[in-house]
Image (cartoon, rainbow, N blue to C red):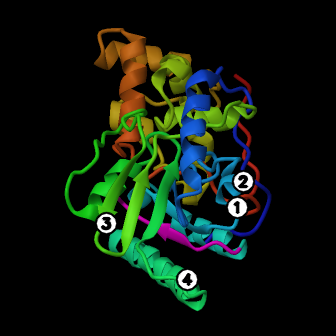
């Protein structure tokens, strides 16, 4: 268990990440029109970046509604990282529900928590002389954090499209989860403005925003600068010598420019095509082929880590 210390700080020299407000405004308008219909907000975040996938307007949307925080992709981070994050959220009065929608881990517990929320709602309704009804829940989160896969697990069949890419869900739709729960599946919603480029980098690395928002090779180079520093933090989950073991090419100690590694690896694996090698590196991280790696760890949980300037 890591000692309490300063926040882990990653590189502020992130490559440009930018999305465009037109589609976001349309999605938020549709979302706002349906918020009054729901009793419960089920917020889904990515376990590798629980802070970067927290929407800054969430509290405005909840407005006193019951809230369940789901941390999906629990399998993609180390047990030490889960333990650290679990304690951090609980200290702030939130109970995180850890899930792996791909295989179904934690889904039954989440469904039971949603049903209990509905029972509390109906108990209050009965106290006001109103008839009970199924709880209406909204599934909310950034693109590609696993909302649709989670819904399919809850229903135990494929009722919504699901894929490991952003933008699969494009419209709101209601899904009946038994007699006790109706669920509204919403498209992924991004903040209208990106003020934190480091958060944008983390979203790009985890494929939680569309690929049109960033340059893949630049993001891969930023990832290469990040890995040696995360290797120093046990809870981050980066195995020593990871790049050499996986690709047969190591970054020499003290070398701050990862472009040489990308060039050497491209010569070995992709006929010299650095763009293809960059995509392979990103795909391997996103599929956990590099192991369970956390890009974020709780603030005040670990000593500071700085990357060399790009």
Residue 304 percent coordinates (x, y): 76, 51
Q: CA distance from mark 4 to mark 2?
A: 24 Å
Q: Please, what secondary structure does the residue beneath circle 4 have?
A: helix
Q: Please, what secondary structure does the residue beneath circle 1 have?
A: loop
Q: Which residue is mark 4?
A: 125
Q: CA distance from mark 1 to mark 2?
A: 6 Å
Residue 98 percent coordinates (x, y): 46, 67
- The answer to whether the residues at label 4 and label 2 have Cβ atoms under 8 Å apart is no
For marks 4 and 2 on the same chain, the one whose residue lies earlier in the sequence = 2
Extreme front residue here? 129
Where residue 225 sits, quadrant-wise, is: top right
Q: Which residue is mark 3?
A: 177
Decide whether residue 95 is among the magenta residues.
yes
Discs 4/2, front = 4
Q: CA distance from mark 4 to mark 3?
A: 21 Å
For marks 2 and 3 on the same chain, the one whose residue lies earlier in the sequence = 2
Extreme right residue here? 6
Decide whether residue 48 is among the magenta residues.
no
For marks 4 and 3 on the same chain, the one whose residue lies earlier in the sequence = 4
Q: Please, what secondary structure does the residue beneath circle 2 have?
A: helix
Q: Which residue is mark 2?
A: 60
Q: CA distance from mark 2 to mark 3?
A: 26 Å
Left or right: 48 with respect to 2?
left
Q: Which residues are magenta?
A: 93-102
What is the number of the mark on residue 181? none
For marks 1 and 4 on the same chain, the one whose residue lies earlier in the sequence = 1
Q: Name which residue lies at 41% across and 37% down.
A: 171
Q: Which residue is mark 1?
A: 63
Left or right: 93 with respect to 180?
right
Q: Name which residue lies at 47% across and 63% down.
A: 137
């Amino acid at each position: 268990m890591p000692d309490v210390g300063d926040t882990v700080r990653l590189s502020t020299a992130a490559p440009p990440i930018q999305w465009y407000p037109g589609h976001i405004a349309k999605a938020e308008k549709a979302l706002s029109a349906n918020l009054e219909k729901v009793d419960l907000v089920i917020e889904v975040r990515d376990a590798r970046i629980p802070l970067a996938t927290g929407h800054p307007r969430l509290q405005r949307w909840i407005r006193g509604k019951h809230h369940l925080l789901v941390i999906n992709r629990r399998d993609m981070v180390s047990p030490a990282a889960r333990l650290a994050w679990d304690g951090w959220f609980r200290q702030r009065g939130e109970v995180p529900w850890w899930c792996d929608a791909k295989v179904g881990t934690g889904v039954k517990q989440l469904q039971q928590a949603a049903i209990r929320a509905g029972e509390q709602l109906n108990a209050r309704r009965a106290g006001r002389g109103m008839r009970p009804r199924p709880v209406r829940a909204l599934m909310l989160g950034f693109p590609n954090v696993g909302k649709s896969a989670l819904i399919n697990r809850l229903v135990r069949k494929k009722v919504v499209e699901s894929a490991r890419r952003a933008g699969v869900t494009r419209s709101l739709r209601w899904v009946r989860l038994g007699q006790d729960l109706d669920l509204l599946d919403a498209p992924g919603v991004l903040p209208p403005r990106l003020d934190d480029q480091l958060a944008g980098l983390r979203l790009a690395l985890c494929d939680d925003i569309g690929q049109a928002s960033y340059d893949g090779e630049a993001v891969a180079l930023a990832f290469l600068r990040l890995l040696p520093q995360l290797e120093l933090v046990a809870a981050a989950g980066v195995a020593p010598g990871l790049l050499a073991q996986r690709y047969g090419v190591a970054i020499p100690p003290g070398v701050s420019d990862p472009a040489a590694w990308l060039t050497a690896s491209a010569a070995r694996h992709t006929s010299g095509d650095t763009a293809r090698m960059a995509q392979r590196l990103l795909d391997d991280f996103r599929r956990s082929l590099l192991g369970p790696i956390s890009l974020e760890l709780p603030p005040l949980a670990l000593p500071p880590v700085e990357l060399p300037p790009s």
